[in-house]
Amino acid sequence: MSLARTLGIGLTGLSGALIEVEADVGNGIPGFILLGLPDAALNESRERIRSAARNSGIPLPNRRLTVNLTPATLHKRGSGFDLAILLAALAADRAITPAPGVVYLAELGLDGSLRPIPGVLPAVMAAVRAGCPAVVVAEENSSEAQLVAGARVRSYAHLSQVLADCGADALALRYRARHNSPARKSAAWSVTGAPAPDLSEVLGQAQGKYALEVAAAGGHHLLFTGPPGAGKTMLAQRLPGLLPDLDDAQALETTAVHSLAAGGTPITSLLRRPPFESPHHSASMVALIGGGSGIPRPGAASRAHRGVLFLDEAPEFSATALDALRQPLESGVLVLHRAAGTASYPARFQLLLAANPCPCGRNLGKGTECTCTPMQRRRYLARLSGPLLDRIDMQLFVPQLSSKELAGRGTGECSAVVAARVAEARAAARDRLKRWGITTNAEVPGAILRNDLRPLTATLAGLNRATESLRLSARGYDRVLRIAWSIADLNEHACPTADDLDVAIQLRQHGKGDVG
C-alpha cells in the first residue's frame, strides 16, 4: 500500500483541531505536492523535509509524493506539521511503520534535528480533548507538553531517533548532534516575570493606594489622572503584587496564550502570577488586541489575561486602538475575524489607564501654568471616549505630592499586608458568587446585582441621588454596586452599607476627596 496517515494539530487561536496527514506515493513525474490550504511557512516544509530525511539516512522516494492535510477546508499554518508529514511520506514508501493514534508536533531542521514550535501547550490540550493523548514533540518542548494532564509525551532531539522507534533500518540511520549556538543555549522562557515592586515605596497617595486595594479585591478597572510625577505609574506597577495567584484552570489558560506568544521558546512551568502588560503608546491596534496576516495572533490584551493591562499616557494611544478594548472589557473574550479565519482569545484583564490632565500636564486648579490651547486639551482628552470611560469602574485624581510627603520615607503598608486583605476579600466574594460560576465582583451581571445581591432599599438612597446628580448610566450604576461589594468584602460586611456605597461613588466620580 502506498498510502499512509499520521496526525497533527491545527491551531486557530487557542482552539485546536485534529489534522489527518495523508501521504500517497505514486507513479508519474517526481514531485512533492502539498494540499490542504497550507500557509507560506507550511509550503516551505517540503524543502526542510527533503533535507532532514536525507541527512537522517532515509531519503524520501524519488517518486510523485502527494500530501493532503484534512479537513482540507481548514487553513493550516506554521512549521509544526513537518514531522507528521515526513513520517506519513516514509510510511507510504514502506520505510517505517508509525504507531497509530500518535500526534506529532515538531519542526525539522535541515540536519534532521527536531526544533520547538510555538503553541505546544494548546496543541497538546487539543490532542487530549480529541482522544489522542500520545504526543511526540521536540526535546525543548517536552516540559511544556507535560503540563497538560493526561498527555503521554515522548520527546526526541533528532529525526533518526523517531525513525528508529518507528521501525526504520538501524544500519541506514545517521544521527548528527546539533550544534547549539548561544541563542539555542539560552534558558527557557520565563513566564513568572520579575517580582512586582512594593507598595510601601510609594510616597503619600493614600487615596490611590486604597483604590488599588479595592481594584485588586474586585478585579475592577481603574483610571489615574494627575500631573506628571505624582506617582500614577508607580501606583499602577504595584497592582500585580496585590493580586492572588492564579488557580489551576486560570494558570493553564493563561500559559496557553503565552505559549503562542513565546515564539517556540520553551516554557517549563505554568504561569501562576497574574501577568502585567504595559505596551508603549505607539502600539498599533493589532499589537494591542491582536491580529496580523493569516490567522490572527494574540495581542497585549490577551497576554494580560487574568492579569493587568496598563496603558501609561493613555491619551497618546490612538482612539481606534483604545475603543477596540471596549468589547473585551465587557465580555472577557477577543474574537478576531480575518479573511483566513476567525480566532478567539481570552482577555479577562484588569485595565489600568494613566493620563495627564493635558498635553503639557499643568492644567491644574485655575490652569494658569498650562501652555496648551483649549483645542489641544479637548483633542488630548477626547482620545478617551465616553463609552470607554463608562466601562472604567474607578476614576481617580492623583494630586501632586507636598514637600512634606516628598521628604518622607514611604512608611506605608507593604504589598504583602495589603495582598493578605485582598486574598480574604476575594475568598469572601468567591464563596458568595460560586453558585453562579463567578469568581470576582467585577464579573457579576447587572441582573444579579439588582435582584439576588440587591442591597437594602434604605442603603440605596444615596446611590439613587448620585445617579441623578452625576447622570450615571445603567452601566455606571451597576459598576458602583460592584465597587461597593468589593469595599464591603474588604470591610468584612455581609452586604454593602451606606458608607460602602458612598465610598464607591467617590471612587467612581473622579473626585479629589480622601477615602479609606
Image: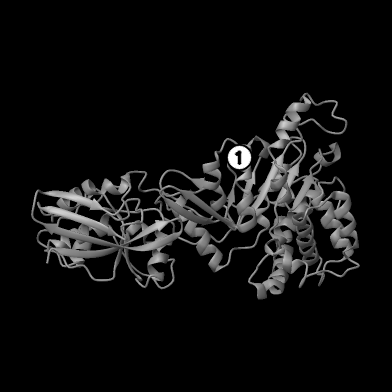
Q: Position of residue 269 (x, y in %)?
A: 47, 61
User: Residue drawn at (30%, 56%), measured in percent from left and top?
Assistant: 81
Left or right? Give the position of 328 relative to 294. Answer: right
Tell me which corner region of the image, top left, top right, bottom left or bottom right, holds residue 478.
bottom right
User: Which one is nearer the viewer's eye here, 243 or 129?
Assistant: 129
Q: Position of residue 147 (x, y in %)?
A: 44, 66
| Residue 397 can be seen in this image | yes
Above/below status of 499 relative to 317: below
Amino acid tagged 1: Thr
- Residue at position x 74%, y 53% from top? 393
Where does label 1 land, which residue? 320
For the N terminus, the quadrant is: bottom left
The C terminus is located in which quarter?
bottom right
Relative to 212, is 247 on the left or the right? left
Q: Estimate the x, y position of residue 363 in percent, counting from the top left.
A: 80, 31
Q: Residue furthest bottom?
A: 435
